[in-house]
């Protein structure tokens, strides 16, 4: 029988090696269980990169699929090194109310310089990996707005600077003991810290890059540019949905208390409500039950519940998800009609929903749950008055302004120096060939010449040039 040795090994995974010489105490076993759960959660969050790769590749055109999927690996590699060297310390290191000033080049053992995480009784290396996954999600969101037209060097430069200059500042404000934390801001797993930051950076990138060729006619009307594989987008959303249980429930930093199960439940309820709300809304408005809208509804609801999953009752989670699903549908249309070509609707899904989710805790947070988590006060609907709602709004405003301004400065400098956008010929050809020399679907090479020539003839103001490749 292998059950007992297996379970013993599993439960002692998070214990220091020295402790294995003696029979583990109850406290040590509890710590090991918590550490094991957070490690599993970290893996789930990091695996969300697979969901983003499939979602974004499927939502864009075939001629860019390999590039879109490949830059996901590039981005995660870049941010892993930058976050280890500087980002982790800037986010959680001891410093002031604005930024951390210690814990750089983290050794994975000594956490004396990151006292903001000292209350979490798990090995420091696991803390680092879990937080690394969050940065990866935020940067993946940001790069979604760059899709199908940004130069490859832009990903290198902006990816590193986002990880060092942008993300850690808001992260420190809210999670690292900064001024918003001192005010009691409630952002349990990152509606603002992770999603709003990435969405605002995506919005700035989208605005500076300008629309894709053929997206708009001369009179401003919109030409749809559908993604090449709807099955990929569905699978991507399913991966993200499952990964979100690590994202939200893992943010309890433990399993022994049982709170992680409650957080997982509210997370799932919100996602389900967002799916139904967005699909029904599209059906009523357009006469068709639009699958991409449903997928965006799922993600928007997950984004919204991320801030409040530990603070609200199940019925409120359903309401938060429903509102997010409806909001993302209408705001996606609104932004598109105003000339903002956001290929994966990053700002509608992660920005608008992130704002709503952050504010929702100021409405629905219960006094019991807020006290259990130990962050902030009860929401407006539970007798908490306007204080918590005001803090949430201040956090949203502060994060939006900082990320927008710094992203604008960085990307404007890049635009004036190396340039942000590929040439028209390269965009028509597709970034798979122009940046990497090989299509994500190599069989297209057989017709490359014909397709490229066809696209080149159409590029002057043609509404259909975007379809020169699938």
Image (cartoon, rainbow, N blue to C red):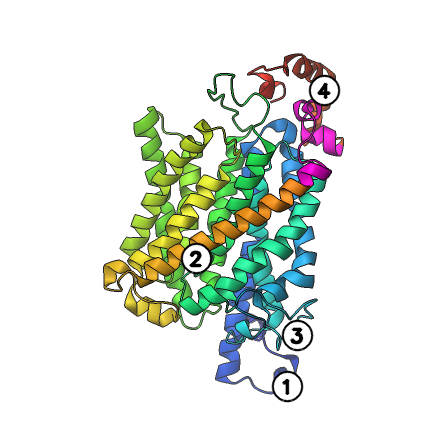
The answer for how far apart the CA atoms under marks 2 and 3 are is 32 Å
Quarter of the figure that contains the N terminus: bottom right
For image coordinates 54% across by 55% down, the residue present is: 45
Task: Quickly name the residue at label 3.
Answer: 109
Distance of mark 4 from mark 1, alpha carbons?
A: 64 Å
Task: Give the overall secondary structure of the magenta segment.
Answer: helix
Q: Note whether residue 273 is visible.
A: no
Is residue 433 within the magenta segment? yes
The residue lying furthest to the right in this view is 437
Contact (CB < 8 A) between labels 1 and 2? no
The label number, if any, that marks residue 121 in the structure image: none
> Mark 3, mark 1: which one is toward the viewer?
3
**Which residue lies under the disc numbered 1?**
21
Is residue 452 toward the left or the right of residue 270 in the image?
Answer: right
- Horizontal side of 85 relative to 271 (left or right) equals right
Label 2 vs label 4, nearer the camera: 2
Q: Give how far across and how far down residue 198 sits, in percent.
A: 53, 48
**Residue toward you, 177 or 247:** 177
Instruction: State how far apart marks 1 and 2 are (Cα).
Output: 48 Å
Callout 4 touching callout 3 (CB < 8 Å): no
Q: Residues within 10 Å of mark 3 (few under 14, many from 20)?
A: few
**Is residue 184 in view from this perspective?**
yes
Q: Secondary structure at mark 3?
A: loop
**Residue at image point 58% right, 71% down:** 95
**Marks 3 and 1, how far apart at CA:** 20 Å
For disc 4, the marked residue is 448
In magenta, the rendered stretch is 414-436
Q: Residue at x 38, y 58 (%)?
A: 392
Direction from residue 280 to residue 67 in the image, left or right = right
């Amino acid at each position: 029988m292998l059950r007992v040795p297996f379970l013993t090994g599993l439960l002692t995974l998070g214990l220091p090696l020295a402790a294995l010489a003696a029979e583990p105490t109850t406290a040590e076993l509890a710590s090991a269980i918590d550490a094991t759960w957070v490690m599993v959660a970290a893996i789930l969050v990091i695996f969300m990169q697979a969901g983003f790769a499939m979602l974004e590749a499927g939502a864009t055109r075939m001629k860019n699929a390999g590039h879109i999927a490949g830059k996901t690996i590039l981005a995660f590699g870049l941010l892993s090194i930058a976050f280890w060297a500087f980002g982790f310390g800037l986010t959680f290191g001891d410093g002031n109310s604005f930024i951390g000033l210690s814990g750089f080049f983290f050794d994975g053992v000594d956490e004396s310089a990151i006292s903001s995480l000292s209350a979490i009784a798990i090995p420091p290396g696991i803390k680092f990996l879990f937080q690394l996954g969050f940065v990866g999600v935020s940067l993946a969101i940001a790069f979604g707005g760059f899709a199908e037209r940004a130069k490859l060097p832009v990903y290198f430069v902006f990816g590193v600077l986002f990880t060092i200059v942008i993300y850690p500042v808001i992260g420190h404000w809210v999670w690292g003991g900064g001024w918003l934390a001192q005010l009691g801001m409630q952002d349990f797993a990152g509606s603002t810290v992770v999603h709003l930051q990435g969405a605002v950076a995506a919005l700035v990138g989208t605005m500076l890059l300008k629309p894709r060729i053929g997206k708009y006619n001369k009179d401003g009307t919109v030409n749809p540019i559908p993604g090449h594989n709807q099955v990929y987008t569905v699978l991507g959303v399913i991966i993200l949905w499952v990964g979100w249980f690590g994202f939200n429930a893992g943010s309890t930093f433990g399993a022994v208390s049982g709170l992680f199960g409650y957080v997982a439940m509210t997370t799932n309820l919100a996602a389900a409500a967002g799916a139904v709300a967005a699909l029904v809304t599209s059906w009523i408005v357009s006469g068709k039950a639009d699958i991409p809208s449903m997928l965006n509804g799922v993600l928007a609801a997950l984004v919204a519940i991320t801030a409040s999953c530990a603070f609200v009752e199940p019925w409120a989670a359903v309401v938060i998800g429903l509102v997010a699903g409806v909001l993302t549908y209408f705001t996606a249309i609104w932004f598109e009609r105003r000339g903002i070509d956001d290929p994966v609707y990053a700002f509608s899904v992660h920005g608008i929903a992130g704002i709503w989710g952050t504010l929702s805790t100021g409405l629905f947070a219960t006094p019991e749950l807020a006290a259990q988590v130990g962050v902030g006060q009860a929401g407006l609907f539970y007798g908490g008055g306007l204080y918590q709602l005001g803090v949430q709004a201040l956090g949203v405003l502060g994060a939006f302004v900082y990320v927008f301004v710094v992203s604008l400065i960085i990307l404007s400098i890049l635009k004036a120096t190396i340039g942000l956008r590929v040439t028209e010929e390269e965009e028509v050809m597709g970034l798979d060939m122009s940046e990497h020399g090989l299509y994500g679907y190599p069989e297209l090479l057989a017709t490359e010449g014909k397709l490229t020539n066809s696209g080149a003839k159409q590029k002057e103001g043609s509404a259909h040039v975007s379809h020169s490749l699938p």
